[in-house]
Image (cartoon, rainbow, N blue to C red):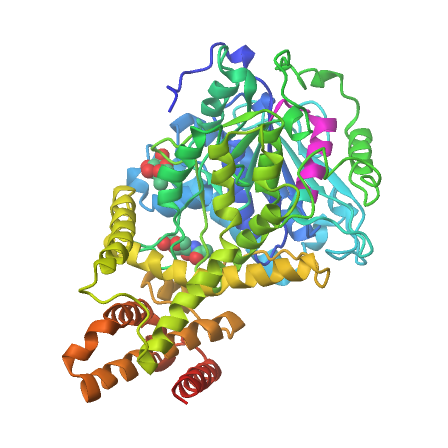
């Protein structure tokens, strides 16, 4: 990694825009969203050069209310952070981690700030629970944009500048904190939604943000972060700028990507959420081939590059872009102009979503956009400082984790099978290593087929007594043993080196099997249906909340099923089938072969035994558990039925 140096003169620092997207006030609670926003506003960066934008795809007045509260709280929170150099600057995390006022520099001030925060969070939670804002606020500027006929899928464009040093001076509040210093610009945006117009999910929201921000701040650098991913390090902007502004090497850098880490991973990471090996090995590896992919959060872009600019040697970044904000007129005029850029029809017959902005019609809009940027000649940089820059919330139930992987595998396969396939699009434009790096993810989904084959066929053959692999005494056995042991020992060592525990590694092996048999299999089916024109793309938001008992089970690392997803039928059936085959196979050996009969079937017994061992939590959830999170009885019966049917058909 490049040495991180301080950028020279404060005056030379460019303006920076920060984009946060949210889409649902229930799945993504507004208190979580504003903690992220507050952590972004509190970056150690000149506030007059910082603008934070929230895109709310639900167009919810509840989220606007939370942001309005946050804009008031920021007046106390930002000076407090700066005075005591607090870290992290997400108030929710800060107050939950440091629960003892005795550790604070100034206990009284600390307690009153904590109260202020908790009162605000309570007000927001109450408003969200009631589903409406206090009567008294309805007439206020901003809130009057909403009326009773509006829904998340049917509303006009809304842009509200909540904080801005110049624009809103003299309006209902000033953009000055308690100490008299400037506050960053804060803008709420909800693009127009009409049911008859397709809105292109997150990519559409990002593109709307690019246009709205170009009217208001137009900064040369854009950071985008997920609404559940707070900043854990207030120096990250300055670190990222070191790459862009490097006089020798900075000219061809299109984006700087920080890795994705999570705040709520349990010790042994039951759902294999932490991507330690990807973050410590794979992405730094790709960095050497021209740069990591864009992974949708924790990423700094040059504005021009997101807008489709091709790399050329003569390109000179205008670091002063957006600095002439003094010339801007009146806030209302500006808001009206910004609204005209986010109507449903604005993008019709334009290059938005094709050549400009994030690419549409792909379930992984981030990866394909990054690939296009690479193919236009730009490089990217991966930066992974020891103190993590961004921390998010990982899914805490099995089905959420699997659904997330379904979307990723589906999107990446879709890229692989399209004209944007890295091998085709990237030929001659990006390094072969980088093309291959992109394709690993493109081939995730097809990987489900051999995995399912290996989980089912050798076991059924074991049941029937058909030997598929070489005997232990055969020289060919060595080849099988070498590949299998080599791969897994290597994987284990790598995983331990990257900070996983032994049990964590075992859990991640289980998750890879579950993902391949469900998420990736569904991914491949969805892609085929889409190619045949039978189905359209969807986008599922993973919930960032879980109820009390479920989170207790999460802390205890007990797998959470609870709902009856069709994915669970597959998982349970494979588990049951292997149990039957193992028992049947072993019985056969004892009854008619003796232990010598084991030899030709040895690999199959071993394989089937390992499959059973890795599925242990599934058997528990099927038969032993009594809690709400166990597998529902309907799934137990279905899986028993399927497994029995398959065994009987095999034996017949
Ligand atoms: C997040 O920041 C805090 C405080 O600066 C630090 O102690 C902690 O190690 C960071 N977390 C991670 C995962 O790096
Ligand atoms: C949303 C969620 O489940 N958050 C949890 C993340 O993990 C921490 C501790 O491990 C919990 O306190 C949070 O509730």
Magenta-colored stretch includes residue 72:
no
Query: Hey, which quadrant is residue 301 in on the image?
Result: top right
Q: Nearer the viewer, residue 44 or 113?
A: 44
Q: Examine the rendered structure and indicate whether residue 617 appears above or below residue 54.
A: below
> Is 12 left, or right, of 626 in this rendering?
right
Quarter of the figure that contains the C terminus = bottom left
Q: Nearer the viewer, residue 11 or 508?
A: 508
Give the camera-side residue of 360 and 15. 360
Residue 543 visible within the image: no
Is 21 positioned to the left or the right of 491 in the image?
right
Q: Quadrant of residue 427?
A: top right
Residue at 55% x, 11% y is 11
Residue 173: horizontal and vertical position, in percent? 67, 33
Q: Is residue 200 visible?
A: yes
* Span of residues in magenta: 204-221
For the stretch drawn in magenta, the main secondary structure is: helix
Q: Is residue 529 left or right of residue 553?
A: right
Q: Is residue 158 above or below residue 325?
A: below
Q: Position of residue 489 (x, y in %)?
A: 24, 50
Q: Residue furthest left?
A: 595
Q: Quadrant of the N terminus?
A: top left
């Amino acid at each position: 990694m490049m040495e991180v140096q301080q950028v020279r003169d404060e005056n030379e620092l460019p303006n920076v825009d920060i984009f946060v997207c949210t889409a649902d006030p229930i799945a993504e609670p507004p208190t979580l969203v504003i903690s992220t926003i507050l952590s972004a506003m509190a970056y150690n960066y000149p506030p007059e050069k910082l603008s934070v934008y929230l895109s709310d795809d639900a167009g919810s007045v509840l989220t606007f209310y939370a942001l309005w509260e946050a804009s008031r709280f920021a007046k106390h929170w930002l000076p407090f952070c700066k005075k005591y150099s607090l870290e992290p600057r997400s108030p929710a995390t800060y107050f939950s981690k440091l629960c003892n006022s005795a550790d604070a520099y100034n206990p009284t001030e600390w307690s009153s700030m904590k109260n202020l925060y908790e009162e605000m969070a309570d007000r927001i939670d109450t408003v969200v629970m009631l589903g409406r804002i206090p009567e008294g606020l309805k007439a206020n500027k901003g809130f009057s944009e909403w009326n009773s006929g509006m829904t998340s899928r049917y509303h006009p464009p809304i842009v509200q500048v909540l904080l801005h040093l110049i624009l809103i001076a003299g309006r209902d509040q000033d953009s000055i904190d308690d100490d008299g210093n400037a506050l960053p610009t804060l803008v709420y945006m909800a693009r127009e939604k009409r049911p008859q117009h397709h809105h292109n999910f997150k990519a559409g929201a990002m593109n709307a943000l690019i246009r709205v921000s170009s009217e208001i701040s137009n900064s040369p650098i854009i950071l985008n972060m997920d609404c559940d991913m707070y900043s854990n390090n207030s120096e990250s902007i300055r670190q990222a700028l070191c790459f862009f502004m490097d006089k020798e090497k900075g000219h061809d850098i299109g984006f700087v990507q920080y890795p994705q880490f999570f705040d709520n991973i349990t010790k042994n990471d039951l759902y294999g959420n932490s991507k330690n090996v990807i973050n410590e090995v794979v992405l730094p590896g790709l960095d050497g081939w021209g740069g990591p992919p864009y992974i949708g959060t924790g990423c700094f872009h040059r504005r021009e590059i997101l807008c489709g600019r091709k790399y050329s040697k003569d390109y000179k970044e205008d670091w002063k872009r957006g600095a002439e904000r003094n010339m801007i007129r009146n806030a209302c005029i500006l808001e009206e102009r910004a609204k005209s850029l986010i109507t449903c029809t604005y993008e019709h017959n334009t290059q938005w979503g094709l050549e400009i902005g994030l690419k549409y019609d792909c379930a992984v809009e981030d990866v394909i956009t990054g690939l296009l940027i690479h193919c236009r000649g730009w490089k990217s940089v991966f930066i992974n400082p020891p103190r993590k820059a961004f921390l998010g919330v990982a899914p805490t139930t099995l089905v959420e984790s699997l659904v997330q992987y379904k979307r990723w595998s589906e999107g990446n396969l879709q890229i692989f099978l399209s004209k944007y396939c890295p091998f085709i699009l990237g030929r001659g434009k990006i390094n072969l290593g980088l093309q291959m790096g992109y394709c690993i993810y493109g081939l995730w989904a097809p990987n489900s087929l051999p995995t399912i084959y290996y989980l089912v066929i050798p076991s059924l053959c074991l049941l029937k007594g058909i030997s598929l692999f070489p005997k232990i005494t055969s020289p060919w056995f060595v080849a099988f043993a070498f590949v299998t042991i080599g791969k897994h020992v290597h994987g284990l060592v790598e995983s331990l080196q990257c900070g996983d525990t032994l049990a964590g590694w075992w859990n991640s092996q289980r998750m890879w099997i579950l993902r391949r048999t469900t998420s990736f299999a569904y991914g491949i089916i969805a892609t085929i249906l889409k190619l045949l024109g039978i189905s359209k793309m969807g986008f599922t938001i993973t919930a960032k909340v879980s109820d009390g008992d479920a989170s207790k089970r999460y802390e205890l690392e007990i797998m959470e099923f609870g709902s009856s997803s069709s994915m669970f039928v597959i998982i349970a059936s494979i588990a049951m089938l292997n149990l039957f085959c193992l028992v049947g196979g072993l019985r056969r050996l004892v009854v008619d072969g003796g232990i010598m009969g084991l030899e030709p079937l040895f690999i199959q017994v071993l394989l089937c035994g390992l499959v059973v061992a890795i599925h242990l939590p599934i058997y528990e959830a099927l038969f032993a558990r009594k809690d709400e999170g166990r597998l529902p009885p309907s799934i137990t019966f279905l899986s028993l039925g399927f497994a029995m049917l398959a065994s009987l058909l095999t034996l017949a």
